[in-house]
Amino acid sequence: MAFSDEGGEFAFPKEVIKCDKKAVERIRRLCDENKVTLIVLGESVAYNGKPNPIMKEIEIFKKELEKMTRLSVVYQVETLTTMESLRKPERFGPRGKVTRRREQELLAKNDASAAALILRSYLEARGRHNM
């Protein structure tokens, strides 16, 4: 999960929410606490532009989010955001190798970083659209 600043110029990673039965409720609470007005959800598409098989599950999740939060939920293509978030240099240990422990820590943080990249992409597209 990631949030933007009030001006919608920056995206900040917040946390990783475990995908279970309590996920939507946790998101709803965070949206209430942070006065969220819109949810941007990653749209998983293949390189040919067609939806990946997981999009069926994402669409169900989107509808549940809209129902529980009473907020609009929009898609933003998430192509390569996971790979981009893994490119950060702090992931490497001594001699450029990733330790198993460090890899687990990074994978846990990676989803929040990827969420921030998706949100940043949405904010940038919206900014260009409004110009």
Image (cartoon, grey):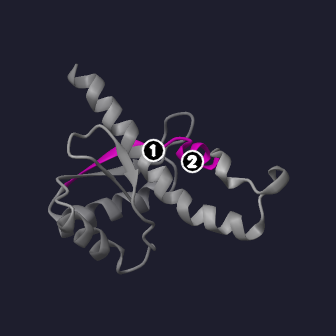
Give coordinates of residue 39: x percent, y percent: 26, 53
Give the left or right position of residue 53, taking residue 62 as reference.
right
Which residue is depicted at the point 42% across and 70% down? 17
Q: CA separation, marks 1 and 2?
A: 8 Å
> What residue occupies the far front of the structure in this picture?
94
Q: Is residue 85 magenta?
A: yes
Residue 30 in which image quadrant: bottom left
Q: Quadrant of the C terminus?
A: top left
Residue to which mark 1 is pinned:
117
Residue to which mark 2 is pinned:
85
- Where disc 2 sits, the SS reads helix
Asked if the residue at tag 2 contacts the one at tag 1, i.e. Cβ–Cβ closer than 8 Å, the answer is yes
Q: Report the amino acid beneath label 2.
A: Ser
Give coordinates of residue 116: x percent, y percent: 42, 49
Give the left or right position of residue 98, taking residue 111 as reference.
right
Q: Is residue 45 above or below residue 28?
A: above
Give coordinates of residue 52: x percent, y percent: 52, 49
Alpha-carbon neighbours of circle 2 within 10 Å: few (<14), some, or many (≥20)? many
- Where disc 1 sits, the SS reads helix
Give coordinates of residue 123: x percent, y percent: 31, 37
User: Which contiguous range is marked in magenta?
Assistant: 72-86
Q: Report the amino acid beneath label 1.
A: Leu
Q: Is residue 90 magenta?
A: no
Q: How many marks?
A: 2
Q: Quadrant of the N terminus?
A: bottom left
